[in-house]
Image (cartoon, helix red, strand yellow):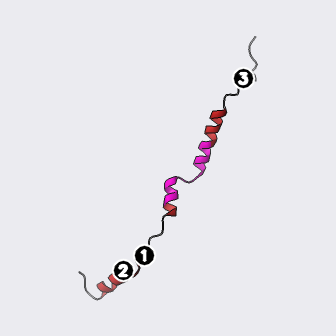
């Protein structure tokens, strides 16, 4: 006599956990993207840039 289709051992615990963790990882931001977002914003140059523009405007190129 053959076994019924419902008579099987439940051996899919690790597979379900692995799939759940994979989906959770993919739902989050990639670590490289997170690092780029959290990087401090670079200033536009500040006082040094103004000083260089003023120097060029006065005609002193070097």
Q: Badge 1, how many Cα within 10 Å: few under 14, some, many 20+?
A: few
Q: Is residue 29 above or below residue 48?
A: above
Give the labeled residue for mark 2.
48
Quarter of the rendering occupied by the N terminus = top right
State left or right for residue 47 relative to residue 23: left
Residue 8 marker: 3
> Going 40% across and 76% down the picture, which residue do you hit?
45
Q: Which stretch did the figure color magenta? A: 21-35
Quarter of the rendering occupied by the C terminus = bottom left
Of the image marks 3 and 1, the number of the one nearer the N terminus: 3
User: SS for tag 2?
Assistant: helix
Tell me whether the residue at label 3 lies in contact with that at label 1, contact meaning CB atoms closer than 8 angstroms: no
Q: Position of residue 44 (x, y in %)?
A: 42, 75
Q: Is residue 34 above or below residue 41?
A: above
Q: Position of residue 7 (x, y in %)?
A: 75, 21
Q: Badge 2, how many Cα within 10 Å: few under 14, some, many 20+?
A: few
Q: Is residue 62 above or below residue 29?
A: below
Q: Badge 3, how many Cα within 10 Å: few under 14, some, many 20+?
A: few
Figure quadrant of residue 61: bottom left
Q: Position of residue 53 (x, y in %)?
A: 34, 83
Give the labeled residue for mark 1.
44
User: SS for tag 3?
Assistant: loop
- Does residue 30 belong to the magenta stretch? yes
> Going 76% across and 19% down the picture, which residue do you hit?
4
Tell me whether the residue at label 3 lies in contact with that at label 2, contact meaning CB atoms closer than 8 angstroms: no
User: SS for tag 1?
Assistant: loop
Q: Nearer the viewer, mark 2 or mark 1?
A: 2
Q: CA distance from mark 3 to mark 1?
A: 66 Å
Q: CA distance from mark 3 to mark 2?
A: 74 Å
- Does residue 31 belong to the magenta stretch? yes
State left or right for residue 22 relative to residue 5: left
């Amino acid at each position: 006599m053959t076994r019924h289709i419902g008579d099987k051992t439940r051996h899919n615990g690790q597979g379900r956990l692995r799939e759940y963790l994979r989906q959770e990882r993919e739902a989050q931001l990639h670590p490289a993207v997170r690092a780029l977002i959290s990087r401090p914003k670079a200033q536009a140059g500040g006082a040094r840039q103004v000083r260089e523009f003023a120097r060029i405007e006065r005609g002193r190129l070097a």
